[in-house]
Image (spheres, rainbow, N blue to C red):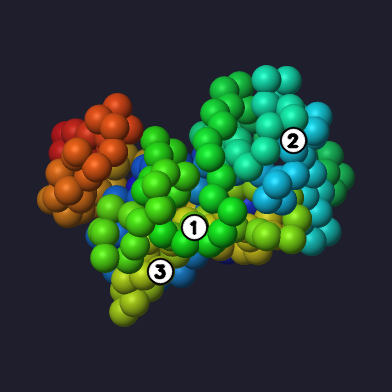
Amino acid sequence: METIKDKTAFEALQLGAATNVEYDPLVVASKLSGWHWTSTMAAYEKAGVPFGKFIIFQSGNETWNITVPKKYQGKRNLVLLANLSPKEGKKEGSVVTLTPKKITAKPMPEQNGWYMPDEFGFPSGNASSNSDETARYLWRRDICAYVGLLSRGSYWWFGYYRRVVLADYYGYYRFGVMISNTGKSGNIDLRTFTKEAKQAIEKMRGAVKEELLTPLDKLVEAAER
């Protein structure tokens, strides 16, 4: 993985930022500091408000939007998730339109808190607590809808932040970006973190569906090559 500094969310997407599930084992095991954009999209409405045809978020001087698939229109308390490629985001002027080919809907917790992660590494599962190392803390907006990219933070002196999944930041914020390279860069080698990742995966077995762990297993296998 290669780290690039100070990019907006749209710039991170165009660079091919790692997905949240790819980044999760690295950020939890590492001593990297600062916040980083991922290429995993989250889009949701204010709690209790049903989906319409579009979800729109005024992200500072940018407007981010997505078309809601018909099967989800009228549904409430869901979050739309997708792992985006650079081609699935377009910016015209100040308007950013996301067009993922594959969108999945998951339950959207109505409040910030600790929840079990799904296959996107998003805290959409059963409520949990900080004492469960496999749980992730969700940070969401509660006064309006949101469309944007998930971001992750790592502060080695306070492990809590290494397990936060942020689904509320403005796209113009300039964070770091982690992109796939040859599996390592000058100071970062994924193989360094495979032991910790394996331990985390084993602790999750039995607590979540096995198919949700498959992407993590594949990531560890790739890092060990």
Mark 2 lies on a secondary structure that is: loop
- How many discs appear? 3
Mark 3 lies on a secondary structure that is: helix
Q: Residue 51 at what x, y percent from top left?
A: 74, 35
Q: Residue 218 at what x, y percent from top left?
A: 25, 31
Whether residue 96 can be seen here: no
Residue shown at the point (25%, 30%) measured from the top left: 210
Vertical arrangement, residue 210 with respect to residue 108, above or below: above
Residue tagged 3: 161
Q: Residue 157 at what x, y percent from top left?
A: 31, 79
| Mark closest to the chain's N terminus, 1 or 2 | 2
Vertical arrangement, residue 55 with respect to residue 87, above or below: below
Report the Cα–Cα distance between label 3 and label 1. 11 Å
| Mark closest to the chain's N terminus, 3 or 2 | 2
Report the Cα–Cα distance between label 3 and label 2. 30 Å
The amino acid type of the residue labelled 1 equals Leu
Instruction: Classify mark 1: residues with Cα within 10 Å, few (<14), some (14-19) or many (20+).
Output: many
Q: Residue 34 at what x, y percent from top left?
A: 46, 69
Residue 51: assigned label? 2
Residue shown at the point (49%, 57%) measured from the top left: 138
Residue tagged 1: 138
Instruction: Classify mark 3: residues with Cα within 10 Å, few (<14), some (14-19) or many (20+).
Output: many
Give the residue furthest to the front: 48
Nearer to us in this view, 49 or 151 = 49
Q: Is residue 105 left or right of residue 195?
A: right
| Mark closest to the chain's N terminus, 3 or 1 | 1
Residue shown at the point (19%, 39%) measured from the top left: 205
Report the Cα–Cα distance between label 1 and label 2. 21 Å
